[in-house]
Image (cartoon, rainbow, N blue to C red):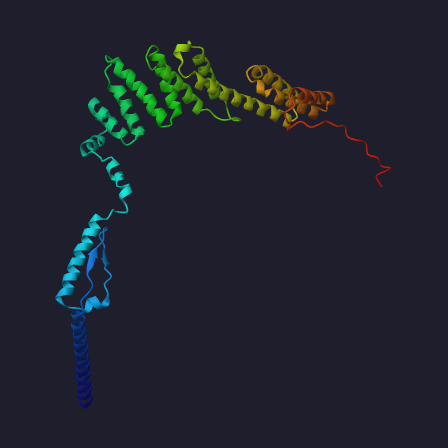
Amino acid sequence: MYNQRNQSVYHFFQHLCIALSLATVTSSIADDAMVVSEIKMPPISRTRKGGYKKRVVPLAATTETTDNTSIAHNTESNDSKNTESSEVSPFAPYAHIKRLKKKKDPQKERILHKKIPSMSLAELQEAKEYVLRFDNTELATQFVQQMLLIHKSDNQEEIRMLRLELADLYFDDGKMKQAGKEYRTYVKFYPGSKEQDTAQYKEILSRFYSRLTPPRDQSITHKTLALANVYLDKPVDQKAYEQDVQKIVKACHQDLYDYEIDIFKQYCTRKQFTGAQTRLAAIKKEFLPIMKQIEPELIEWEGALAQQQGKAEIVAQSIETLKTKFPEYAPTVLVVYQKPKKKDYVTRF
């Protein structure tokens, strides 16, 4: 019993000491708060971006409590507001971007949420024009395709314009194969239209851009060349893009020539000299009449083939022809053929 009583007394005094210490701490905090409240804090202004910044005020100005200083602070704050409003924003040169941004139309956005097969012709036209404002050619292509499906056959002029528009959308979207097919369809169905020449030219362009570079397959290049030759055979007043098509023809000829030369090189690498000679003769027959600039190169390849076969006379003849007929041409493959000298074992040691 005695020990329990001593223990309770000890706990009572312990709690009393803790309470007294807390009372002293709170009183000291209150005194500090009174001192802080007597100090005048510097004014705070709102920044342009919505945050807050402290205005730099001298310490002496903060301690003064006279009426004159308060009036000075008020005038200073008013002047600062006026200067801030009159200042030009650092983002002013880019303010036109907000005006140029194309705002979305909520009513037309609702049309886009519909399924394309359930849309009417007027809705498809409106949706197509709306998405083209944002350069969405892929979605516009789907709208035009659906318009062609549901359009009445009695209005052939609108169908013609839709076909041309579909081809142009494919072309602008970079889908050259689809664009070439659509231009081909337009040229076939509407041979007497005003846009016939432009459609035929764009068909050639679509084929040209979708071709593969050598040494890959050149079947599309052959088709492009055939279309270009048909275009150049038209009357002069019906081919407004003659110069551009002639450049395309030259580029196609160069690709086909590079493709054939690559096959010739493969024959030489495998030492199939009969096939290489036959291929070189075919190249001369096909490309030399239309590409005069390749003559020195063909002479060099002929000499290089003879050099691999060990025909010194043909090699010397090729080198002599290049020197006399094309003195400015520098051979890169052909070298002067020399017979290997016999080893002189007497002077060797």
Above or below, 61 against 193 in this view is below
Above or below, 306 against 109 in this view is above
Outermost residue toward the left in this view: 67
Whether residue 130 sits left or right of residue 294 in the image: it is left
Corner quadrant of residue 126: top left
Q: Where residue 339 appears, x then y in whole percent?
A: 77, 28
Outermost residue toward the front in this view: 68
Q: Closer to the camera, 37 or 149?
A: 37
Q: Where residue 44 appears, x then y in whole percent?
A: 20, 59
Outermost residue toward the right in this view: 346
* Rendered residue at 23%/48% (across/down): 87
Q: Where residue 212 appears, x then y in whole percent?
A: 48, 26
Q: How many marks?
A: 0
Q: Where residue 91 appears, x then y in whole percent?
A: 28, 45
Whether residue 14 sits left or right of residue 288 in the image: it is left
Above or below, 36 against 274 in this view is below
Q: Point out the image quarter for the C terminus.
A: top right
Corner quadrant of residue 26: bottom left
Q: Closer to the camera, 331 or 73?
A: 73
* Rendered residue at 28%/32% (across/down): 134
* Rendered residue at 21%/48% (across/down): 86
Q: Point out the image quarter for the N terminus.
A: bottom left
Whether residue 210 sits left or right of residue 129 in the image: it is right
